[in-house]
Amino acid sequence: MGVTKVVEIPITLEIPVGPQHPALHEPLMLKVYADGEDVIRVDINTGYNHRGVEKLCEKNNFYQNIFLCGRVCGICNTVHANCYTRAVEYVLDIDPPRRAKYLRVLAMELERIHSHMIINAIMAEILGFDTLFMYIMRDREKIMKAKEILTGNRVLADYMMIGGVRRDVDEVKKDRIKKLLDSIEPDVRYYKKVFEEDDTILKRLVDVGVIKPRDITLHGLLGPTARGSGIEIDVRAGDRYDAYDEVPFNVVVRKEMDSWARMMVRWEETLESINMCRYVLEHLPSDGPAVPDERRLPRRFPEGESFARVEAPRGELTYYVYSVGKQIPYRVKIRTPSFNNIINSGFTYIGYSIADVPVILTSYDPCIACMERAVVIDLESGVRKLVSLRTIVKGGV
Amino acid sequence: MGKPALLKQVVKWFFKKPVTIQYPFEKTVVEKDIRGRHYVDLNKCIGCSLCAIECPADAIVMEKLPEDIKPPKNRRGVYPVVYYGPCIFCYRCVTVCPVNAFITTDDYHLADFVKRDSREYSLKTYKGEST
């Protein structure tokens, strides 16, 4: 009897991870091509969360945009507002008093602490370590309380204003924030130790998602992702904006280059930030009113353009503001760190197993709401063609 | 396989009270100066519309005052109504008001079965009733 049927088994499997997926907290599509369990190619597709913030910035006036820019990202809202506010201050040529600058640093460092804690918690959840997730989130509430005392809200601070901040702190508030910082420090040290010693975490994170320093600079990766591969890049140290020229801190760098190193950079930065917050509270200058009268702020904006950058918890965040002398800006361009870190990171998944894909993605601290732009990403044209497995592995599709 | 690092914490917290707050049966403790529900005091408002112009979320609409309410300072006869749905509670309206007419509270219980705005709260201020 002759052959009547041929069963063709495809070598490459196409696995869509997202846009709705248990491992992802925000809509992002990772099209994973796998040979068995091994990832041989990842296409990153965004555009599920585009909100048109930049266009809306061109319709609102300069003051309304402070609150709009704060809502680009929920977790890093004060850094977004700070970066925009500083860009507008450069156009207006306003220099806020030192006290306001110190308070801005305090708000941003509190935000860095809770942002780093939440991504470490999410990493624990992705690994299937839900107990650790719950414990970190429980202790993170202390920082949320500190932020509530300082800014008047747990998450969306709305703390920045042109020429200063919107709330001052008194001695009672200072003491309460100090006590909360004192109580969070042993917790952070404990969780850092857990990340260093626990078998489950080490087995899933160590030697997963290794990025060499050359690839970091080649693909323009930023923030803790770059610092985890031994590249000392930090805007706080580079630009010394606001009060970072007076507040002492170390740039945390690790040389392990894997997902574990990136998470450890975050824990060590959290401890650095706690010390910075303490320094700010102890050395708060009183050289002028930190809170400007918002009714007397300038209504006329001169022509000009400015560029500001801050170190967000995820990396370097930049704002470009172009004013043509009207009440509204002509253009506000936002470049967030996640935009670089996620879209350019497709090459880092290759060679690892499918189970490692969410781990590697989480180690970049993805913030999808931040990074959505109207950028057309060149995907496959849809035409099927047959290529050998060797070509695919070499990246020649 | 090594010892689970969290075991000590798990045993310790097993005998403690849960930290979860059972809202709405148990109220969350918030700061006194948290940015909560706010509404305009009709005795102070001059109807200048600056809050509605400056609102980043377009949550404030200037509406005509009812005929029986005629505050002496409010010559234009309009007052701001804050719609709490689109409101982002940034308090920009509170800080730009030239006569400090907004009353701020720490009330964050905004979930309701009906759509709420600041109309009834504002009108109560004119009659002198407590809200």
Image: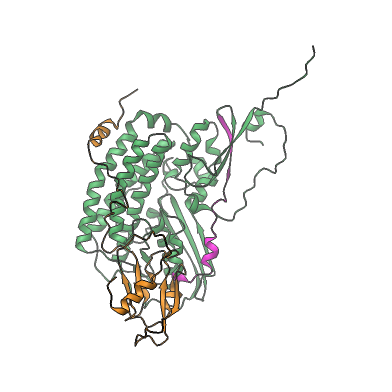
Name the colouring of the figure: by chain
Residue A211 in sight here: no
**In the rendered image of this protein, which colour is used for chain B?**
orange
For the C terminus of chain A, the quadrant is top right
For residue A370, above or below residue B77:
above
Q: How many marks?
A: 0
Q: Is residue A41 magenta?
A: yes
- Residue A8: where, in percent of width, then height? 70, 24
Query: Is A349 displayed left or right of A149 in the figure?
Result: right
- Residue A313: where, in percent of width, then height? 40, 50
The magenta stretch spans which residues? A38-63
Residue B62 in sight here: yes
Depth check: give the residue in front, A396 or A173.
A173
For the N terminus of chain A, the quadrant is top right
Query: Is A117 displayed left or right of A362 in the figure?
Result: left
Q: Which chain is green?
A: A
- Residue A142: where, in percent of width, then height? 28, 50
